[in-house]
Image (cartoon, rainbow, N blue to C red):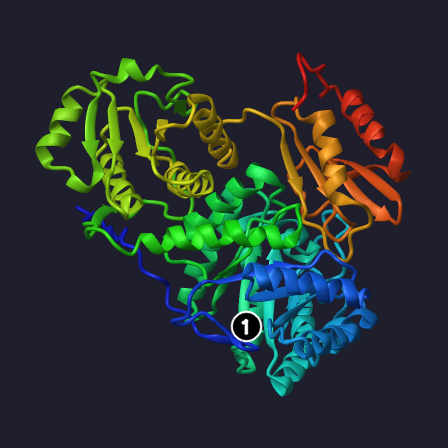
Amino acid sequence: MTESKSKTLDFNYRRRATWPVKVGNVTIGGDNPVRLQSMTSTSTMDTDGSVAQIKRIADAGAEIVRLTAQGVREAENLAEISARLRADGCSVPLVADIHFNPRAAFAAASRVEKVRINPGNFVDPGRVFKKIDYTDEEYSAEIEKIEEGLVPLLDICREHSTALRIGVNHGSLSDRIMSRYGDTPAGMVESALEFLRVCLRHDFRDVVISIKASNVCVMVETVRRLVDAMAREDMHFPLHLGVTEAGDAEDGRIKSAVGIGSLLAEGIGDTIRVSLSEEPECEIEPATGIVKFIASLSSGPEVAAVTVGEDYDSYKPSRRKSRWTDRLPQVVGLDIDPDSLSGALALKAEDGIAPELIEELKADSDRVVVLGSEVSNALGHLRAFLTVLKSEGVENPVIVCRDYTGLSEQERTIAASVEFGSLLLAGFADGVWIKASGESRERLTALALNILQATRLRISKTEFISCPGCGRTLYDLQSTLREIKAATSHLKGLKIGVMGCIVNGPGEMADADYGYVGAAAGKISLYKGKECIEKNIPAEEAISHLVSLIKTNGDWVEPSGPVR
């Protein structure tokens, strides 16, 4: 008889150990705090505008600022921007963002404190979004090209004490990676590892990794897989976290808090960016709020370890089986009258779960459990308790209830997004019950639905996948996003990408139904999925063309009331 294996899960907050990486006067990883980043939206050739914006970003609390450098000319101007900042007493480290142009990376590496490259397009050619078959020999030859292309950059970085960021994005994997792995988390992880192995072979460790997606579920799963893969190869590079193309307003903040916060709560992540389609300095306040909330998890009573079967999937947990498994996650106040829960069994996660309670629940599996917590590290206790229920096969419906009375609106939004987002991504909660004395039930219901939308478990509105804009952006992205929202926000379930340029074009809006992409100055291209349908439309006509495209494909419905 084969003995079944098991593994032990620890839900106490403990930071993942990483190698420290120095970026100018800031060190990422090691024992250092989680660092906050943002990126300029100005043209890198606009020295005055870039300097002024970087100062605003730094004054807001950013510790590192990134600028696009699409060519050698922009890369060289980074030296002027840096000199102006230093002369004005601003010492914030600068990062050059490179796509498709190794020469720009070589030029930037001697002028800024860090260079970011995208493995999907640094050596490999730009994607054509077609199936390309590689023999084993051809594939190996392409891997050799990575080393040939990357090592000269490592040499320049070493000479100038410049750090490197290897930034993988979901929608910009190379056709070569796609040929073997498809558009998958495994492909994203391998894309990063190919470059990291080269770095280690050449004894270059001043590397930070980012691996991003606009889909929160994909982003979280991929980062978990990367951390595990690096551990197996004895790599301990620090990680930068972000949900790319998160959008704006509350939607963008909730998406970011769910994705970034869930990983930080697991001890993963050394630097973050909340990527919003707003002025870049606006990104710092929610980023600060996320980090502050995560810091609170380090206090509170110890969470008991939980033993689970070997088949437990820590990358992408399946939904816990319960009497409500066939329902969408329920929202108390919308789907369930709070008064109807008077007969539910109210439990506190920090009290633990005794064997007799498990038996009691199994004997009455229709009885609803309302599970709450009143400790600062509630998330750890909730995850441990619910993991036990799942591993023991307890099928009672569980409504997770958290009371955020006393928190500001932003604090409540972040706390609820991190806690419920983490639990929902783990497949635990059958119901969401957010409380806050003095706040309307309508407002709390909207928050719950937005968190469920971010986790892709319950779709209640249009999703906008929108980049924050940068020096490559070819139109007024913020005002255009507002106009597109005004025209289409009633189309429940559609995903619409609003992208500033072709670099962030069909790739980064990988799973969008429709895309609006800057093609040239004053020109827009429209996409259905990843297929370009109309090219170079005058910007003033593009939104009406987008609406027509949606109508042509049968996805349009007339709004029943005022469009929000």
Residue 165 screen position, x and y as percent: 59, 68
Compared to residue 104, the image places residue 387 above or below, namely above
Badge 1 local density, few (<14 within 10 Å), some, or many (20+)? many
- Using the image, determine if residue 213 lies above or below residue 21: above
Asked if residue 68 can be seen in this view, the reply is: no
In this rendering, the answer to whether 464 lies above or below 518 is above
**Marker count (numbered):** 1
Position of 498 relative to 14 (above/below)? above
Q: Nearer the viewer, residue 111 or 117?
A: 111
Q: Amino acid at mark 1?
A: Val
Q: Residue furthest left?
A: 356
Image side of residue 502 versus residue 27, left or right: right
Q: For the point 29% across and 56% down, which residue is it?
A: 298
Where's residue 175, x and y in %? 70, 54
Q: Which residue is mark 1?
A: 207
Most extreme residue toward the bottom, as rendered?
159
The residue depicted at 50 percent of the width and 75 percent of the height is 21
Q: Position of residue 288 (x, y in %)?
A: 48, 54
Say which of 181 and 149 sits in front: 149
Q: Quadrant of the C terminus?
A: top right
Q: Is residue 56 left or right of residue 9?
A: right
Place residue 64 in its image quadrant.
bottom right
Please tell me whether mark 1 sits on a helix, a strand or a loop. Answer: strand
Residue 462 visible to an observer of this rendering: yes
Percent position of residue 14, x then y:
31, 60
